[in-house]
Image (tube, rainbow, N blue to C red):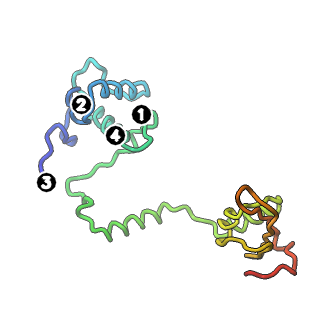
């Protein structure tokens, strides 16, 4: 691995000139000025123009902004300097040091840790509400709630009755009957 030029080593960086910032971010002088002006307008304490060297804190903020602007849909208006404050030591592992299976397991563990618990009865509660309010659901809405497409003129699943009552746009419209109101003579499809 080749040594980075001193201009890019922020751990040892005391300050950069405007030319250094242009080179660091591969942008024009006017882009650097525009970013600094917009950050100042948002209350960021970026060094005044009269100082020829930008401080470590200024550079950290500008580095975070530069990283942020590479994200699709990111703007200076939705930038927060606290989004990009990850410090890695020289002995921290990189993705080159981690095998793919280990990386996959790590991602799975993180996903499980931040996953929002799903209520296993939420679909039944939605069907209960649809029945109580007399809402007509499309075939795709019914499929999302019960996991299968309803078939025939009358269909029973999870104790709820589904009756075909016409069209809902391009799809069949289904009236949902509460389990307490399902007629006994409906054919069983459970």
Please tell me the numbered disc located at residue 1.
Answer: 3
- For the C terminus, the image quarter is bottom right
Mark closer to the chain start, 4 or 3: 3
- Are the two marked residues, 1 and 4, in contact with CB atoms closer than 8 angstroms? no
Give percent across and percent down for residue 94.
Answer: 25, 58
Give percent across and percent down for residue 176.
Answer: 79, 66
> Which image quadrant is residue 146 in?
bottom right
> Taking 115 as reference, is 189 left or right?
right
Q: Secondary structure at mark 3?
A: loop
Mark closer to the chain start, 1 or 2: 2
- For the N terminus, the image quarter is bottom left
> Which image quadrant is residue 76 in?
top left
- Are the two marked residues, 2 and 3, in contact with CB atoms closer than 8 angstroms? no
> Which image quadrant is residue 77 in?
top left
Q: CA distance from mark 4 to mark 3?
A: 24 Å
- Residue assigned mark 4: 64
> Taking 111 as reference, is 170 left or right?
right
- Residue assigned mark 1: 76
Q: Nearer the viewer, mark 4 or mark 2?
A: 2
The residue closer to the viewer here, 52 or 142, is 142
Q: Nearer the viewer, mark 1 or mark 4?
A: 1
Mark closer to the chain start, 2 or 3: 3
- Residue assigned mark 2: 22
- Are the two marked residues, 4 and 2, in contact with CB atoms closer than 8 angstroms? no
Give percent across and percent down for residue 5.
Answer: 14, 41
Give me the residue at 64% from left, 70% from top.
120
Give me the residue at 46% from left, 37% from top.
78
């Amino acid at each position: 691995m080749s040594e980075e030029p001193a201009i890019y080593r922020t751990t040892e960086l005391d300050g950069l000139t405007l030319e250094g910032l242009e080179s660091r971010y591969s942008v024009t002088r006017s882009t650097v000025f525009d970013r600094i002006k917009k950050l100042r307008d948002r209350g960021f304490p970026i060094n005044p123009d009269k100082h020829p060297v930008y401080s470590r804190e200024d550079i950290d903020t500008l580095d975070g902004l530069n990283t942020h602007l590479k994200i699709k849909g990111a703007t200076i208006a939705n930038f927060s300097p606290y989004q990009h404050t990850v410090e890695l030591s020289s002995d921290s592992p990189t993705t080159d040091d981690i095998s793919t299976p280990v990386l996959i397991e790590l991602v799975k563990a993180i996903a499980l840790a931040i996953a929002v618990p799903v209520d296993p009865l939420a679909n039944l509660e939605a069907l209960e509400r649809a029945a109580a309010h007399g809402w007509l659901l499309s075939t795709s809405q019914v499929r999302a709630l019960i996991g299968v497409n309803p078939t025939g003129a009358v269909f029973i699943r999870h104790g709820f009755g589904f009756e075909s009552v016409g069209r809902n746009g391009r799809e069949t419209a289904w009236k949902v009957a509460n389990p307490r109101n399902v007629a006994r003579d409906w054919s069983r499809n459970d």
